[in-house]
Image (tube, helix red, strand yellow):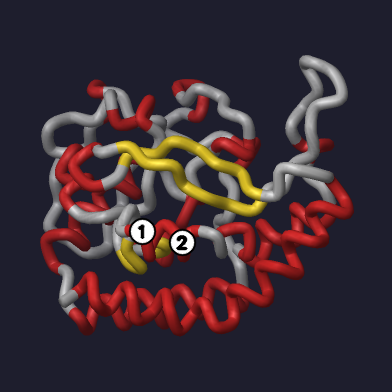
Amino acid sequence: MKRGGDLAVAALAGIIAVPLGLVIALLIRATMGGPVIFRQTRSGRHGQEFRILKFRTMRDKRYEDEPDAPRITRLGALLRRTSLDELPQLWNVARGDMAVIGPRPTLPEQVVHYSPRQRGRLALRPGLTGWAQIRGRNSISWPERIELDLWYIEHRTLLLDLRILLGTARMLLRPTGITAAGGVNPGFPVPAETPAATPAARVVLPRQATAAAPRLAREELPR
């Protein structure tokens, strides 16, 4: 049932996304050259890896140690701010790699540090958007995000999904929490940082020190 709904949403969104995506692809090609699509390995349902798709937002490095920030083009910054760089993930939904709503897919190097409880986050297909996305996105720490995702998996209903879709629409109009401060997602999960379980929908956990998080290129940060 949920899979049918995902395909229906992807098909309806594709009516707008395909022509808009073609325009974006032409602009990326004109300003940065190829490739137009950025591909990255992520962990999906039950830990099965797949290649997530995004529009490219960073130009190539001019020298080996060039910082990330100057590489984000004006077009790339606009795509990130509006989340239009995520449009190609409708193809991931159509393929069955992802769902419309679910925990955002993370990097395999994060998943290997999940505790048995945190691995419960992999019970569903990862989503284009989710409960953690509308509750803070990248502005909250990984333990908080994981707990919010686990709460969603336990309490998911059609009504909750509709609430997430409405919350996502609001976030697209007033974007917040797109990228963590300094380009680092705080509280990169390691076993020692596993938070205690909580049944409450509103999870308030201590922020983890960003120093414990490996620095990844901004293009590579899970969003």
For the residues marked 2 and 1, what is the alpha-carbon distance in whole angstroms?
Answer: 6 Å
Please, what secondary structure does the residue beneath circle 1 have?
helix
Q: Amino acid at mark 2?
A: Trp
> What number of labels is visible?
2
Q: Amino acid at mark 1?
A: Arg
Q: Quadrant of residue 164?
A: bottom left
Judge by depth and name the residue closer to the eye, 181 or 102: 102
The reply to whether dot 2 and dot 1 touch (C-beta < 8 Å) is yes
| Whether residue 135 can be seen here | no
| Whether residue 217 can be seen here | yes
Residue placed under numbered mark 2 in the picture: 91
Residue at image location 27% in from the left, 62% down from the top? 202
Q: Is residue 92 left or right of residue 189?
A: right
Q: Is residue 60 left or right of residue 201?
A: right
Residue placed under numbered mark 1 in the picture: 95
Q: Is residue 116 left or right of residue 206?
A: left
Residue at image location 13% in from the left, 67% down from the top? 155
List x then y, in percent, for residue 100: 36, 68
List x then y, in percent, for residue 47: 24, 37
Residue sitting at the far top:
64
Against 210, residue 183 (above or below) is below
Residue at image location 68% in from the left, 61% down from the top? 81
